[in-house]
């Protein structure tokens, strides 16, 4: 018969490190930022991690996000895993991942059910058509924002890479893996060359 | 597919469209643009467009499988790479790779924009709504949700 013992871990751990963040707290924090993020969670993630909870400094956040951005896969999902792991190891990564994806997946699945049942209704079709027109516009706005610094730099090689990828994927419709297999090494080489030239 | 989504879900859209519509015929163009609209309307990461496609193909199980296979493998990769990077101190090459990927991912996103535009916009009015939304979103700090709702109302009223 196991006797109830007082929790030892609370005493023995965390003498030098700051108070560990609970897995539940992690889950809820990521669920919140995910549900707040219509059309992009990043802004909310930054606000929650840096400003609200103070889990990272702004520099640490940028650095972590840069890693997540150049890794394949959805950035924000990567961010949740990398961040969760930094704070609480693998359980932390799982908690953040589940918090980020769990609740919105439930909502989206529910919407999918509605869509497959009522998708043929004329009014809904029209409404969705209107929404998608705007959604496309929003996407263009994001692209324009991202393109500004590139245009300001006036680096012809960068602009050429961008244009080549656009033509290959958007107009010629080549499969993405092939384009990336060629594009990534070429772009890395060009970047190294440009840096050498400007550094010399 | 997810392993190639450099720079976020929006750059993977051409590939998602190619696989779901052109290769496998899981969805029509019209359904694809509906699904894109729903994914933009929903909270959470935009990557959830694959959840919707998964549901169209194979119900709730399909939705779960699509989501996990889109996010799971890369999450594992992210975990290991970040641990590796945390240990290495002389880190100039992540900066180089990152700088090299910026023009690539913008090119990809522009291709995404073109493809969803061709599936979503079917009339001159639709194109102008897209243009107005783009300018408003670019020039103001208006919450995008209001623009999406506005588009929905215009559509509902039968203007498009």
Image (cartoon, coloured by chain):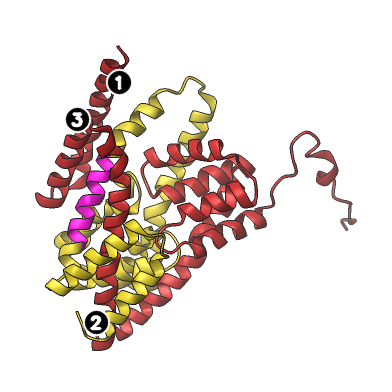
Chain colours: A red, B yellow
Q: Are marks 2 and 1 in contact (CB under 8 Å)?
A: no
Q: Distance between the Cα atoms at labels 2 and 1?
A: 50 Å
**Which residue is label 2 attached to?**
A126
Q: Name the quadrant containing residue A127.
A: bottom left
- Label 1 environment density (alpha carbons within 10 Å; few <14, some 14–19, many ≥20): few
Q: Magenta includes B113?
A: yes
Answer above or below: position of A200 versus A5.
Answer: above
The image shows a total of numbered marks equal to: 3
**Which residue is label 3 attached to?**
A157
State the image coordinates of residue B100 (x, y, percent, origin top left): 29, 32
- Label 3 environment density (alpha carbons within 10 Å; few <14, some 14–19, many ≥20): some
* Residue B66 or residue A18, whichever sits in front: A18
Q: Residue furthest left?
A: A172
Which residue corresponds to the image point at 25% horizontal and 20% vertical from the top-left?
A193
Q: Distance between the Cα atoms at labels 3 and 2?
A: 43 Å
State the image coordinates of residue A151 (x, y, percent, origin top left): 25, 39
Which residue corresponds to the image point at 42% horizontal and 76% vertical from the top-left?
A110
Q: Give whichever of discs 2 and 1 has the lower sequence position.
A: 2
For the residue labelled by badge 3, is the local secondary structure a helix, a strand or a loop? helix
Q: Magenta includes A98?
A: no
Q: Name the quadrant containing residue A40.
A: bottom left
Answer above or below: position of A169 versus B134.
Answer: above
Considering the whole magenta stretch, tell me its main secondary structure. helix
**Callout 3: chain:** A
Q: Give whichever of discs 1 and 3 has the lower sequence position.
A: 3
Q: Distance between the Cα atoms at labels 1 and 3?
A: 12 Å
Magenta-drawn segment:
B103-116
**Callout 1: chain:** A
Which residue corresponds to the image point at 61% horizontal and 60% vertical from the top-left?
A28
Q: Is residue B28 visible?
A: no
């Amino acid at each position: 018969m196991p006797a109830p013992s007082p929790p030892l871990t609370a005493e023995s751990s965390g003498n030098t490190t700051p108070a560990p963040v609970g897995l539940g707290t992690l889950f809820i924090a990521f669920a919140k930022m995910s549900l707040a993020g219509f059309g992009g969670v990043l802004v909310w993630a930054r606000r929650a991690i840096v400003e609200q909870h103070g889990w990272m400094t702004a520099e640490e956040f940028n650095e972590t996000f840069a890693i997540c951005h150049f890794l394949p896969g959805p950035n924000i999902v990567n961010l949740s895993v990398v961040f969760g792991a930094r704070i609480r190891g693998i359980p932390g990564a799982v908690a953040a991942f589940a918090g980020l994806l769990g609740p919105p997946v439930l909502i989206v699945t529910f919407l999918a059910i509605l869509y497959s049942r009522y998708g043929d209704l004329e009014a809904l079709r029209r409404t969705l058509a209107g929404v998608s027109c705007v959604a496309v516009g929003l996407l263009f706005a994001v692209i324009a924002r991202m393109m500004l610094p590139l245009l300001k730099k006036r680096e012809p090689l960068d602009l050429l890479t961008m244009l080549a990828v656009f033509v290959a994927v958007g107009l010629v419709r080549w499969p993405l893996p092939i384009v990336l297999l060629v594009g990534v090494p070429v772009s890395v080489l060009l970047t190294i060359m440009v840096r050498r030239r400007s550094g010399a | 597919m997810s392993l190639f989504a450099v720079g976020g879900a929006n750059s993977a859209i051409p590939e998602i469209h190619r696989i779901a519509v052109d290769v496998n015929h899981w969805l029509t163009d019209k359904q694809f643009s509906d699904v894109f609209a729903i994914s933009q309307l929903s909270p959470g990461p935009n990557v959830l467009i694959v959840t919707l496609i998964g549901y169209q193909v194979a119900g709730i199980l399909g939705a779960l499988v699509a989501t996990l296979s889109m996010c799971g493998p890369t999450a594992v990769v992210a975990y290991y790479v970040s641990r590796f990077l945390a240990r290495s101190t002389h880190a100039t090459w992540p900066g180089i790779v990152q700088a090299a990927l910026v023009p690539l991912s913008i090119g990809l996103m522009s291709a995404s924009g073109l493809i969803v535009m061709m599936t979503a916009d079917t009339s001159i009015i639709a194109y102008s709504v897209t243009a107005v939304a783009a300018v408003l979103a670019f020039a103001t700090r208006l919450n995008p949700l209001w623009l999406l709702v506005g588009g929905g109302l215009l559509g509902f009223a039968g203007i498009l």
